[in-house]
């Protein structure tokens, strides 16, 4: 019960990683406000709010809800994000980029800005965790706008940690690899329809895709006192995919490698 008595907000909590993170925090004793633009499935002990993570008025409202209903804010999980599709760099429009950056990057900025302000006003420390992606580390894991927005988050948490020096408020990011969620659902469905479901995640050393609960566990770690000395970091959870540069896989015969 690492979050017993703690108040938390999770954005993008209607499904996928956000839903898993909200349930994980709830299971460990937190009082949780789940926020999403989509309807949020009810859960015992969880409050919900319809809101847009990239809209400042909605972010102010969710923080105020935490203050009014939960007595403050201890954990902010800025998870909401959109993919923006896989259009090439020269095929996407300014409107496409603006929408992705507004939700993914500006949404994280607003969560940090107003979440940290609430923690400071209460004179308390806290933890802010933003969902970035391995797409923010290297090319090849998402569209250009999405990848740029996630790279921005990785740099944003480092800057925020420095700006909050001396406050006791920690800001970190988690960088998921290939995780089965509503966003990646079409990719999984296509692979399975082609009889290639067993190849999902084959490029990482664990040779499988990840589960939203595995990312939720990483988020809970970063938000907890177990990570009390972790600050301004981007924790990669991708089965080892980003641990190497591309290379030709070794030929294997039984358990031997040649």
Image (spheres, rainbow, N blue to C red):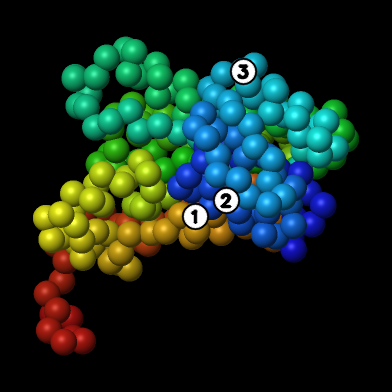
Give the structural element (helix, strand or loop) at label 2: helix
Please say if 34 is above or below 110.
below
Residue depicted at 55% across the width and 24% down the height? 52
Most foreground residue, 55 or 206: 55
Please report whichever mark, 1 or 2, sits nearer to the chain's N-terminal start. Answer: 2
Give the structural element (helix, strand or loop) at label 3: helix
Q: Where is residue 66 shown, x and y percent of the image?
A: 76, 34
Residue 238 quadrant = bottom left
**Other residues around mark 2 within 10 Å, as few (<14) / some (14–19) / many (≥20):** many
Per the image, the residue denoted by label 3 is: 56
**Other residues around mark 3 within 10 Å, as few (<14) / some (14–19) / many (≥20):** some
**In the shown orientation, is residue 13 left or right of residue 250?**
right
**Other residues around mark 1 within 10 Å, as few (<14) / some (14–19) / many (≥20):** many
Label of residue 42 in the image? none
Task: Please say if the residues under marks 1 and 2 sit with CB atoms less than 8 Å apart.
Answer: yes
The quarter in which the N terminus is drawn is bottom right
Task: Tell me the mark number nearer the camera, choosing from 1 and 2.
Answer: 2
Residue 58 quadrant = top right
Per the image, the residue denoted by label 2 is: 21
Please say if 200 is above or below 234.
below
Q: Where is residue 224 shown, x and y percent of the image?
A: 70, 55
Q: Is residue 158 visible?
A: no
């Amino acid at each position: 019960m690492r979050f017993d008595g703690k108040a938390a907000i999770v954005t993008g909590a209607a499904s996928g990683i956000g839903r898993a993170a909200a349930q994980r925090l709830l299971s460990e004793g937190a009082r949780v406000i789940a926020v999403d633009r989509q309807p949020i499935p009810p859960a015992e002990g969880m409050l919900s709010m319809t809101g847009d993570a990239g809209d400042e008025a909605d972010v102010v409202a969710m923080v105020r809800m935490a203050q009014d209903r939960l007595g403050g804010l201890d954990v902010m999980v800025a998870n909401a994000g959109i993919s923006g599709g896989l259009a090439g760099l020269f095929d996407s429009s300014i409107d496409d980029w603006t929408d992705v950056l507004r939700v993914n990057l500006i949404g994280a900025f607003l969560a940090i800005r107003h979440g940290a302000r609430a923690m400071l006003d209460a004179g308390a420390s806290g933890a802010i965790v933003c969902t970035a992606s391995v797409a923010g580390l290297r090319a090849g894991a998402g569209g250009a706008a999405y990848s740029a927005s996630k790279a921005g988050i990785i740099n944003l948490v480092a800057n925020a940690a420095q700006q909050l020096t001396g406050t006791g408020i920690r800001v970190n990011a988690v960088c998921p690899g290939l995780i089965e969620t509503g966003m990646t659902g079409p990719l999984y469905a296509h692979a399975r329809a082609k009889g290639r479901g067993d190849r999902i995640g084959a490029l990482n050393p664990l040779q499988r895709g990840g589960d939203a609960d595995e990312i939720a566990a990483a988020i809970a770690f970063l938000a907890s006192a177990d990570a009390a000395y972790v600050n301004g970091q981007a924790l990669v959870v991708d089965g080892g995919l980003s641990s190497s540069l591309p290379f030709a896989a070794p030929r294997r015969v039984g358990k031997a490698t040649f």
